[in-house]
Every structure is written in C-alpha cells, then in structure tokens.
Image (spheres, coloured by chain):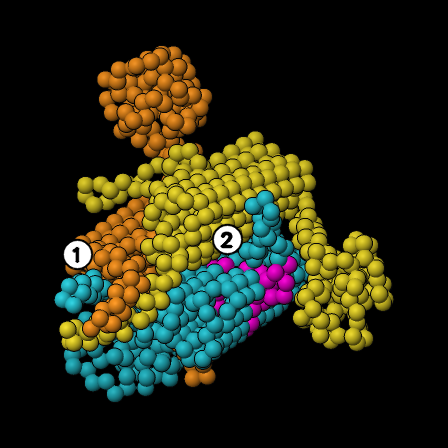
Chain colours: A yellow, B orange, C cyan
Amino acid sequence: MEFTVQQIADLLQGSVEGDNTVKVSTLAKIEEAQAGALAFLSNSKYEPFLYTSGASAVIVAEKLELKKPVAATLIRVEDPYTSFSVLLHYYQTALIASKVGVEEPAFIGAGSQIGDGHYRGAFSYIGQNCTIGENVRIFPQVYIGDSVKIGDNTTIFAGAKLYTNTVVGSNCTIHAGAVLGSDGFGFAPQPDGSYKAIPQIGNVVLGDDVSIGANTTIDCATMGATLIGQGSKIDNLVQVAHNVEVGKHTVIAAQAGISGSAKLGNNCVIAGQAGIVGHISLADKTTVGAQSGVSKTVKEPGTIIQGSPAFDYKQNLRAMTVFRKLPELQRELELLKEKV
Amino acid sequence: MEFTVQQIADLLQGSVEGDNTVKVSTLAKIEEAQAGALAFLSNSKYEPFLYTSGASAVIVAEKLELKKPVAATLIRVEDPYTSFSVLLHYYQTALIASKVGVEEPAFIGAGSQIGDGHYRGAFSYIGQNCTIGENVRIFPQVYIGDSVKIGDNTTIFAGAKLYTNTVVGSNCTIHAGAVLGSDGFGFAPQPDGSYKAIPQIGNVVLGDDVSIGANTTIDCATMGATLIGQGSKIDNLVQVAHNVEVGKHTVIAAQAGISGSAKLGNNCVIAGQAGIVGHISLADKTTVGAQSGVSKTVKEPGTIIQGSPAFDYKQNLRAMTVFRKLPELQRELELLKEKV
Amino acid sequence: MEFTVQQIADLLQGSVEGDNTVKVSTLAKIEEAQAGALAFLSNSKYEPFLYTSGASAVIVAEKLELKKPVAATLIRVEDPYTSFSVLLHYYQTALIASKVGVEEPAFIGAGSQIGDGHYRGAFSYIGQNCTIGENVRIFPQVYIGDSVKIGDNTTIFAGAKLYTNTVVGSNCTIHAGAVLGSDGFGFAPQPDGSYKAIPQIGNVVLGDDVSIGANTTIDCATMGATLIGQGSKIDNLVQVAHNVEVGKHTVIAAQAGISGSAKLGNNCVIAGQAGIVGHISLADKTTVGAQSGVSKTVKEPGTIIQGSPAFDYKQNLRAMTVFRKLPELQRELELLKEKV
C-alpha cells in the first residue's frame, strides 16, 4: 500500500509543509524511520530526531516551531499522537481486510454456513453444521470442528484449532496455534493405581471482543462451558482449564495458568507466569503479580496480591526485603543468644 | 445424536416415570439443563433444582421420594451418578467413533500402512514407512513424520505433530498442537562464545493409554528414547526435555517442565507450573506441589515436596507461615537488641 | 540408510578390526545398542559394556587394549568421541537433506521466490512476495505469511507459523508449532473499563544461526522489530514479547518468558521458567537461574542472579538456607524474649 503525503494529510485533516507528492508505504518510529516511512513527533524529547530522520514524512503539531531545516515533508495536525494512532488502526485493519475469498484447497463440511465478506485460507478446515458470521477471516491451516459458532468480524490466524461445539463471539481475535476446546484434564484414580479419563463433553464459549494469544490453550468444560467474558484479553501460552469462568475485560498475561473451575471476576489483571488454583474465586479488579501462586479466594474487589503462595503485595514486598537479610538476622540472633 | 428417554432407560436398565417418547440430544448439569437435555440428580443438595429444571429428562434414584411435581420425565436407576457416567462415556466415544474414512486431500507416503476403521482428516500428513494400527483417528492437519509407529485405537487431534521415528502405544490420546520428537535442546559452547548444535537423533516413545495435552512439547532423545510410561497423563503446555523417562501412571499438570535426563517414577503427581531440573530422579509416588522447583533426587517413595527450591511440604508450609511475619520478627529482634 | 563398517572407517580414517562387511543403519549408546547399530566407547567407565554390547560395530580408541573377546566389529580411531560426533552430524544432516522437492498440494502466492534445492512439504503455505533462499526445508503445514524473507539453509519444521513481514536469517532452525510475529499484547484501557487493541505493525527478525524451539511464541513489535540476535538458541514454549531485543549467542531455556521491550545482551543464559519484566536490560553474560523473576536492570556483565524477585545467587542461596529454618529461628527468638 502506497499513499501520497497529501492523501494522508486529507485523511487526518492536516496541512502539508513541503513536497505533497512524496509517497510513503510504511509507518515507523522517528528515530528508526527510513525513506518511504511516515513517522510522528509528539514528545519534545524526540525533537532532535526530526532534524536527522530519514523519514519521507513526519506528522508534527500545528504549533511546533522548527529550530533547524527539515528534509522530510511535514504534516501538521492538532495532536500528532492521536493522528498517528488513527493511521496505525487504518494500516492494521487494511492488512487484514485485504484477505478476502477462498484459497483452494479449503475444506468445508456439510451443513456449514459462512457469511459474506469472508476469507478462508488454503488448508483451512471447517467441519459440519457450523454457523459463521460475516467478514470472518479464517487463515490457512485453521481447524474448526463440527457445530462451531462464530460471530461477525472475527479473525482466526493460521493454525488455530477450535474443537467441536466451540462458540466464539463477534470481533474476536484468535492467534496462531491457539487451541480452544481440548479435553479438560480429569482422570479418576482406579484401585490399581491407574487413571480412567472422565469424559469432557462441554465446550468453550468466548464473548464478543475477546483476544486469545498464540499457542494458548483453553480446555472444554466437563459439562457446560468454559467461559471467557466479553472484552477479556488473553496473552500467549496461557493455560485455562476446564470449567473456568473469566469475567469481562479481564487481562491475563503470558504463561499464566488458571486451574479447573476457578472463577475470575471482571477487570482483573493476572500478570505473567502466575498460577490460580482450582475452585477459587477472584473478586472484580483483583490484580495478581507475576509468578504468583493464588491458593485462596479473594473476596475484596481491588485486592492486589503477590508471592507464591500469594498474599497482600505490600506485606509481600516487606517480607521479601527481610528475606534477603535473613543470614544477617540469623547472625544477630546468635550474637544475642551468646550475650544473654 | 437424538434418543428417546425409553431408549436411554433401556440402556441403563432403569424405569421411566412420565412421557417415554420425549427426546434428548445432550447431557447437562441439573442446574443448567434446558429443553433437549438429560440431567441427573445424585447429591440431595441439588434436589431443589429437580423441581425447577428445564431438562427434558432427569436420572434419579429408585428410592427418591418427590416433594413436588416435576415437569421432566424421570428415569429411575439404582445409582444415578454411575448411570450418568456410563452415558458420558457412550457420548464421548460416539463423537470420536463417528469420524471414519478419509477426507481428501490427505497425504500418505510410500510404504506406510494403516489399519481398518481409521479416520484421516483433510490436510493430515503421514510420511513414509509408517505402521499405524486399527481404529486410529487422525484429525485434520496432523503431521506424522517418516517411520512412525502408532498402536490401535489411538486418537490424534487436529494439528498435533509427530516427528520421524516417534512411537505411540495403543489407546493413547494426543491433543491438538502437541509436538512429539522436536530436537532436544543441546548445544556445545565453542571457544568464540557461539554454540554448536549437538545432533539429536533419538526419538519419543509413548506407552499404551498415555494422554498428551494440547500444545505440550516432548523432545526426542539425543540417542535412545524419551519415554512416557504406560497410563501416564500429561496436561497442556508441558515441556518434557530430551532423554527424560516418565514411569507408569504418573500425572503431570499444565505448564510443568521436566529437564533433560530426569527420571520420574511410577504414580508420581507433578502439579502445575512445577519444574524438575535435569539428571535427577523422583521415587515412585512422589508428589511435587504447584510452582515448585525440584533440584535434588527424591529417594523415598511417597515423598511430598513444595517450594522453589523444593523441600518437605510441611516444613515448607511452616517456613512460609513465618516468612509472612518476617518484618515483625525483625522488629522484635531489634527491640531485644536494644534491651540487652 | 545403511553402510558397511568399512565405509564408515574410511570416512573416519580409522582401521577395521573384524568383519568389515557388517552393515549398520543407526547410531546408539553402547549400553543400549542392538544388532544393526554402531556405538562408541570413549569413557573407560563404559568398557564393560563393550564385551556384552549387542552393537554390530563399535568405535574405539587406537590404543585400547581388549581384556576379553568382543563380538562387534571394531573401528579404531584416535578420538572415538570426536569421530562419533562427526557421524551424528552426518546422520542428522542426511535426514534433513533427504527431503527435497515439492509434495502436492502446497500453496505458494504470487510474486514469491524460493531458491534451489528446497523442500516444500504437503499443505505448506507461502504467501505473496516472499523471498526465500537456497536449500530451505519447509515441512508440511508450515505457514509463511506475505512478504516474509528467509535466508539459505534454514529448516522450518511442521506447522510452524511465520506471520507477514517476518525476517529469518540463514542456517536457522524453527521447530514445529513455533509462532513468529503474532500481535504484541498491547491494549489501551478505556474510561469504561474495557480495552482497545493498540495496533502492532512491526515484525520479528531472526539473525543467522538462530534456533527456535517447538511451540515457542515471539510477538511482532508494535513498530520496528522484535530482534533475536545471531546464534541465539531458544528452547520450547518460550514467550518473547513485542519489541524485545535478544543479543548474540544468548540461550533461553524452556518456558522462560521475556516481557515487552526487555533487552538481553550477548552470551546470556536464561534458565527454564524464568521471567524477565518489561523495559529492563541484562548486561552481556548475565545468567538467570531457573524460575527466577528479574525485575531490575542488570548492569554488570557476568552477573548471576536467582530468586523471585531475583538477586545475587550466592546471597539467595544463603537466604534460602535460613528460610528453611525460619520456624526454629522464631522459636529461639521467643525463648530469648522470655529470658530477657
């Protein structure tokens, strides 16, 4: 995609200073931008880069006063950061939207329906009796089992796998290699020490506006549904076990793990590599620190916890401060014992 | 799949109370069940739901005395929980068994053999000289390298990858995105600070009745085999490094990691996000707590350890209790020093 | 692949003792080797196995004096370990090199170019305008998005996914299921408690000689590139977030996680399950212990840290030693208080 500076200025309702026929084809940071790139200057800390940047064009503030000559064409707008964000959204949306139609071979089972404006990449698989909305992008090698339902405007990247009966809302993004609906890890111990699998016949249900990271796994419920609420965002390599319920607008960072039947409230933040044990609840707006292990229900909304096992993060911080000095503490105690 | 209540009652050797022509097509919990669903009532705590449930039919105990009228058709059996479990197994088995035959395009290399009753999904790949048993289900986009051996009745879900020379037993389940046989992480440091890959020419061998979770990775041995013993169950996103040996009926929960050449005994339980360092052994029936880091061999069968690094879990619990009070302990020590 | 012992001896410039027409088809450890296998004896601790081994042939030192009769044919060389390593490299290289040509169906988009000597497995996907070097092996079900660049002699195993604009150097190995270029985890909180995705339009750039483990995920940069430097080796299930920069010859073990915009120096070692918070730097040759959580920049090259949060590993070791004795320490303090 290539645009003239004038086209971009028109889009942003800005004014051009310099050659308005210059063409740009990518967006870049001002300190890294090269020919063909459009950058922006918002924070005055970066102003020195304006005079040395290789960018073909730079978005700057209307009121900026130049201290030296500038090689790049300028686009003057009221708020350069906001204008640049608008362009970023255009750029990413255009990239995805450029994928339309069906690349053969692609498989679609009997009784499945898919709405207008969709993309089905080569080697993608859709089972039987699926109901898929409009403008859905299904990238190559995606697997969609039987009787899956997917809302409008959802994008599923290469090689993601949705088991039979999975339900996905509208405007969701599922990244490459994510697995939704694998069997919950449930095994009944037998008298001889072996284990027998407990059938897992439930499914996974994602609300609207949910994002699932690359290679993340979400198990189906034993019965009923493993639920990810509207607007929740899950990072890469996260494990969500069977019958977990995640509320709305909750964020789970990479490599965190949520054990079976745990319930997370709305607007929680679970940091990276944290673990939540099974069958507990976290109140709304609970924050769990990185690498923490949460073993008890959190009842008070807005609680912040840290540690493995996790407790109040300020207490944890103080305890960790003393932990580092434990050898000295021990020595002081020894000295005192001798004295007494 | 749709059945009349009478058909199910016959299967369970139960008696029908109400309309025996009612049809059910799914199984659900009594508190969530809607029209078309069959539920069960085992624990009397849930009896109130019997009188309000939307289920079309409910399995109840022969001896249950109704306190109110019930809308659903009842199936009376001796033990509702056991009867329901039987149905769950039927249901899950039927779902898998309904997949038979070959969906084109599917790839199979020269010299490979596969037994009767199999399913090969579209875009599945089988290399050369593979030997695959009967009733094996190979879902779409599965990759099976050259010279792989797979026993009877094994199911491999969408997009799992088995490198060349992998051996899988009978009655195994391998979930979506799992990788068996990737190179062990072995690099020899060179004098210039760079690393040279040590060839990894061994393989991965799974015994019978093994379950491997979604996106779990098991590396091939440098030479010989990385072994997962009969009946062992491995959850999602677990890392098993080269030359590891896991015994029989050992359970490894999600996101745990087993480093190179570690040996786990039989009937061990490794909780979520735990790590085991390389070249150590765990005795039979060792239990490792969540997020623990095991750095030493465990010789005593039945040992329970916790912490990072891990030690006796009761000691760890007591130490953690004091850990939280460290700031107070420090203050008390200061006061005492002043006094003395 | 089958060779006579004489062929192998010629390759290694060694001399044959016994039947030089014996054929071998695999390599094995001397204590596990069976008929058809070639083993080696380097460490004298293993000499007893020489007299009982089922190997068809064994590589031994020129100067070795036999204490008993040996069934296997011997190949005498100066340094058995080095000679065996040479064979291992031959073996692994031959396995990969045997894959040449295109297995249909394979997809390649308009404007993409790929050099001589390549392999493209069935169901592999290459988007538009890609530039791929010579002798590149693309295994089945690999996904390569648009405008991707890949250097010579790189191998990409089954089902790995490279998003649009990814750049991979020469002599790289990318294992099954790895994902390069998924969206960075960036969401702007909105006044109503919901989150809005921040477009992630950058890419992932791997230097030459980089190895990426199975099911590892590397996110694209928000703008610019997430960089993995030349010769760095990343194990399985590792998470590398957006805008991270990893130096040269740095090793990251399984299940470690590197948060956004962190910068790792050259020749660092990050052990398994460790986590690095965002926006910090690690000096060259920093070593981070297993399960550690690094929350601060490390300025001193060669620093070794451990713990969550991580600090000097020797201090951590001493503090952990006292941690185990905390209950006793508390009791002693109580006793002392009573005395005073």
State the mark number for residue C75: none
The foreground one among A265 and B106 is A265
Q: Is residue C82 above or below residue B235?
A: below
Q: Quadrant of residue C17?
A: bottom left
Give the quarter of the figure containing the N terminus of chain B.
top left
Residue at (19, 43) in percent of width and height: A192
Q: Dot 1 corresponds to which residue?
A: B301
Q: Is residue C332 above or below residue A240?
A: below
Image: magenta residue range: C201-228
Q: Is residue C337 visible?
A: yes
Q: Quick one: label 1, few (<14), some, or many (20+) residues within 10 Å?
A: some
Q: Is residue A332 above or below residue B70?
A: below
Q: Dot 2 corresponds to which residue?
A: A235
Q: Secondary structure at mark 2?
A: loop
Q: Quick one: label 2, few (<14), some, or many (20+) residues within 10 Å?
A: many
The foreground one among C222 and B11 is C222
The foreground one among A16 and A131 is A16
Residue at (39, 43) in percent of width and height: A299
Residue at (25, 79) in percent of width and height: C43
